[in-house]
Amino acid sequence: MDYEVEILIVEDNMSDAEMTIRALKKNNLTNKLLHLKDGAEALDFIFARENYSDRKIENIPKVILLDLKMPKVNGIQVLQELKSDERTKKIPVVILTSSKEDPDIQECYCLGANSYVVKPVQFEMFVKVVSELGLYWMILNQPPK
Amino acid sequence: MNTKPKILIVDDKPENLKALRKVLKDLDIELVEATSGNDALKATLCHDFVLALLDIQMPGMDGYELAGILREEEKTAHLPFIFISAVYTDNLNVFKGYENGAFSFITKPFQPEILINKVKFFIDKHQQEVALYELNEELKNANKELDAFTYSVSHDLRAPLRAVNGYAEMLNEDYGTHLDDEGKRLIENINYYAKKMGALIDDLLAFSRLGRKEIQVSEIDMNEMVEGVLIEMNKSITHNAKIKIGKLHQVNADYGLLHQVMFNLISNAIKYSSKKEHPIIEISSNEKNGKIVFSIKDNGAGFNMKYADKLFGVFQRLHSQEEFEGTGVGLAIVQRVISKHKGNVWAEGNINEGATFNFSLT
C-alpha cells in the first residue's frame, strides 16, 4: 500500500464520506486520498502503529478532515492526541461535522483545530463547502516545513 | 426525606424542656434540646430543623440574640421560631420578637393545644415545601431529559437526511440525461421534502436549545430592536407590507431571545398578510396593570378563535403548506421565550380579518 497521503478523511458515516470524496473528485483532489472509518484506525495511521507500522510518521498529510461523532474513539479524542504530540501537532485538522453546538466548537479550537465546518444538509451546499475546503488546504495553504 | 421533622427546643431550665416535651409527645416529630444559645447554635450545625421553640430569658445569650444570629446564618436564615416566655409578656417584647423574624410568640402559661396547633402548622408547611421541592426537582429532570432527547434526535436526523438529499442529487447529476420529465419531477420532490425536513429539524433544534438557555436580562430599546429585525428581515423576505411602528416601551429582557420573538411575530404577520392587496402591520405597546403589552397586528388571513389554543403548540398549524409554508415551531418558540420571562402570550383574530399577537412582560 502506498502511504503517501495528502488528504485523510476520518468519517464513520459512509454516505457523508461518499459525498465528500465525490466533491473532492470533481476538483481532481483525490489522487492521494485515504478514507478511514473510525478514530482508532485514524490514530494508528497518524502515529504509524499496528497496520500502519511500516509507514513513516514524518510523512504527514496536508490536511485531515475529521468527523466528531464516531464510535469508540471520537473526533475530539483523535484531535487531542495528535495535537499533543510534537511529531503530529503541525498537521492541519479541519473538523467537518454535523454539530453546530457551541461547546463542541469551543473545545475543538481549544484543542488546536485549524478550522471548524458544519456539514450543510443541502447537497449543493455540501459539495460547494467541501470543494472550497479541498482547494484551500491542498492548493492555497502553505503546509508546514 | 422520610425522617421525622426535627424541632429545636431551647430553654435554660430543664423543667421547662421537660414540660415542652410532654406537651408535644403525641406529635410525630424529633425534639432536639438545648439549654443555652450556644448549645442551640451547635445543634443547628448538625441538624436540619423545621422549627425552633425559643425561651427568651436565658443567661448569656438570650432568645432574641439567638434568633438574630440564626437569621444571619445561611443554613437557618429561613428557620421559623416560636418564642415562649413567661416573663416578658408586654407588647413591646412581642414586637421585638417579630422584628427578629419570629413567626409566633406564646406567653406562659399557655394552653397546650395552642402550642400543639402552632407546631403542627409549621410541620405541615414544611412537609408541603418538601413535597413541592421534590416535585419541582422531578419536573426539572424530566425537562432536562426531554431537551437532551430532542437535541440528539435533531442531531442524528441530519446525517441520513443529508444522504437522502445527496443521493437524489447524485442520481440527477449522473443519470439525469436518461430521465424524462416525470423522472426529474420525482427527484425534485425528493429534494423538496428533504429540504422541508431539514427546516423542521433546524427549528426543533432551535426550540430545544431555548430550553437549555439561561436568560440574561438587560434594558432593551424596543424601537431600536424592531428596526434591526426589519433590516434583517428585508434581506431574506420580499414583501410589500406597510409596517407602522408606534413608540414602544423599553423593557428588561434577554436581548437575543426577544429579538427572536419579534422576528417570528413580524415575519408571521408578513407571511399571513402577503395575499392581501394592501398588507398593513402595526406594532405597538401599552402599559396595563403594571405590565407592558406588545402587540403585532396584521390585516391578513386571520384565524378562527375556536383554535386559538392550538396556535402556540409545537408543530401545530392552522394553515396547509399550500396556503402558507411553515414548520409550526415559530410561535412555540415565542411562547417558550415569553414564559421564560414570566410573561404571557395570547392572540386574537377572525378569519380573513387579520390577527393580533400580544405578549406581556413585567
Image (tube, coloured by chain):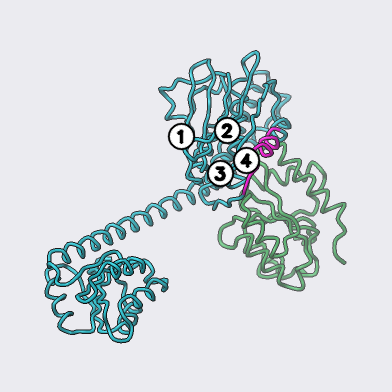
**Which residue corresponds to mark 4?**
B259
Q: Secondary structure at mark 4?
A: helix
Nearest to N terminus: mark 2 or mark 3: 3
| Pointer 1 residue | B313
In this view, the residue farthest toward the bottom is B60
- The residue tagged 3 is B205
**Mark 1 neighbour density, 10 Å: few (under 14) some (14–19) many (20 or more):** some
Q: Amino acid at mark 1?
A: Gly
Residue B285 image label: 2
| A112 vs A43, nearest the viewer | A112
Label 1 to label 2: alpha-carbon separation:
25 Å
Q: Is residue B135 visible?
A: yes
Q: Amino acid at mark 2?
A: Ser
- Spatial distance from mark 2 to mark 4, Cα to Cα? 16 Å
- The residue under label 3 is which amino acid type? Leu
Residue B170 visible: no
On whether disc 1 and disc 2 are found on a single subunit, the reply is yes
The green chain is A
Helix, strand or loop status at disc 2: strand
| Marks 2,4: beta carbons within 8 A | no
What is the distance, in whole Å, between disc 3 and disc 1 at their CAs? 15 Å
The chain under label 1 reads B
Q: Colour of chain B?
A: cyan
Q: Label 2 is found on which chain of the structure? A: B
Write the start and end of the magenta stretch as one range.
B219-230
Q: Distance between the Cα atoms at labels 1 and 4?
A: 20 Å
